[in-house]
Image: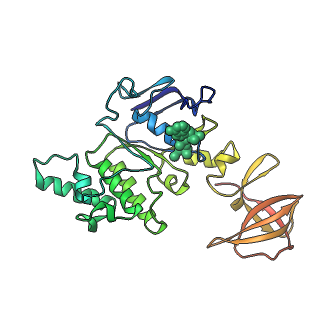
Amino acid sequence: MLKVENITFTYNVKSTDAPVLNTIDFTVNKGEHISIIGESGSGKSTLLKLIYGEYDLNEGQIFWKDKEILGPKYNLVVGYDFMKYVAQEFDLMPFITVEENIGKHLSNFFPEEKKERVQELLTVVELQDFVKTKVKTLSGGQKQRVALARALAKQPEIILLDEPFSHIDNFQKQSLRRSVFAYLKEKNITCLVATHDREDVLGYADRMLVLHDSKIIANNSPQELYRHPELPLIASFFGEVNVLDNVIVFAHQLKSTDSSDLKAIVLRSYFKGHYYLIEADYQGAIIRFEHPTALEKNREVFLEEIKRQ
Ligand code: ADP
Ligand code: MG
């Protein structure tokens, strides 16, 4: 199990720099899937790097089971066998093949098994047809898949993924996510995924850690955070939000009706596929709701709130 105990970290570029992460404290169970979310610059990547032992902590400690993860000051070779980390900027060896990159750290004693293992990993990342391709000729998304497969090769106990699908086009993302996350669950590999993409989280994460202002502002299941988002920042992860009388109301919770106390004037309709997002003026502020069709500008609408499931 992973224990992150009250860690504080500053990059120390200037001595006056505020900590990027401040008294961060959480645990992760074996096989659990955690999403680390937060705005750009909130410290997601830094947190993963600290867990990997890339920097020395100012305060606090990190353990995997009973083993303390130490920074470079106390551990000359960064990294551990039981943990793999796929950075946002993955580095592969460009002049050798996909197969050679993935098998780099696998033993050559059993060439047949090694070949099968590489094939299995290529299936997980949906890259079966590129075994013999030189990495330098691959697209960014394909390289990202190779980096993922390489990290999985020796079956780590815990894997840290930083924006793992950011370079992969939308077309292939859904299927790749399902494949990779199903594989991790099946093998009971603990995984921490830093992301700002809700699609990486919903349906997969057991828990979400939300970073904001160098702190964890939420640590709970996606279901729980959706039902009781304490802040608009958290709610906005699940969809468009309105704050009405200090209460968070999702755009999909507002429905037009014949008459109500909530009268708004339509400003704009955005096509969203199976619905339109309507922007309207409500007492001088913008209110957003979902509607099956576009609505004409300046039209009057009455809205009612439907309960969140
Ligand atoms: P995220 O991954 O959530 O976008 P990061 O962990 O990359 O956030 O960055 C958190 C903060 O730390 C940002 O303000 C960033 O500018 C700063 N930072 C990141 N890496 C370094 C570095 N190597 N040296 C100094 N500051 C850094
Ligand atoms: Mg990052």
Percent position of residue 117, x then y = 21, 54
Q: How many marks?
A: 0
Q: Dividing the image into 4 quarters, which one contains the N terminus?
A: top left
Q: Dividing the image into 4 quarters, which one contains the C terminus?
A: bottom right
Rendered residue at 59%/47% (across/down): 40
Residue 177, by quadrant, is: bottom left
Decide: is 297 above or below 128: below
Decide: is 85 above or below 268: above
Please identify the residue farthest to the front as the structure is shown: 14
Percent position of residue 136, x then y = 32, 61
Nearer to us in this view, 113 or 54: 54
Is residue 43 in view from this perspective?
Answer: no
Is residue 212 in view from this perspective?
Answer: yes
Percent position of residue 10, x then y = 55, 30
Rendered residue at 67%/47% (across/down): 233
Rendered residue at 49%/42% (across/down): 45
Residue 305, by quadrant, is: bottom right
Decide: is 209 above or below 16: below
Percent position of residue 102, x then y = 26, 53
Rendered residue at 26%/49% (across/down): 153
Display colour scheme: rainbow
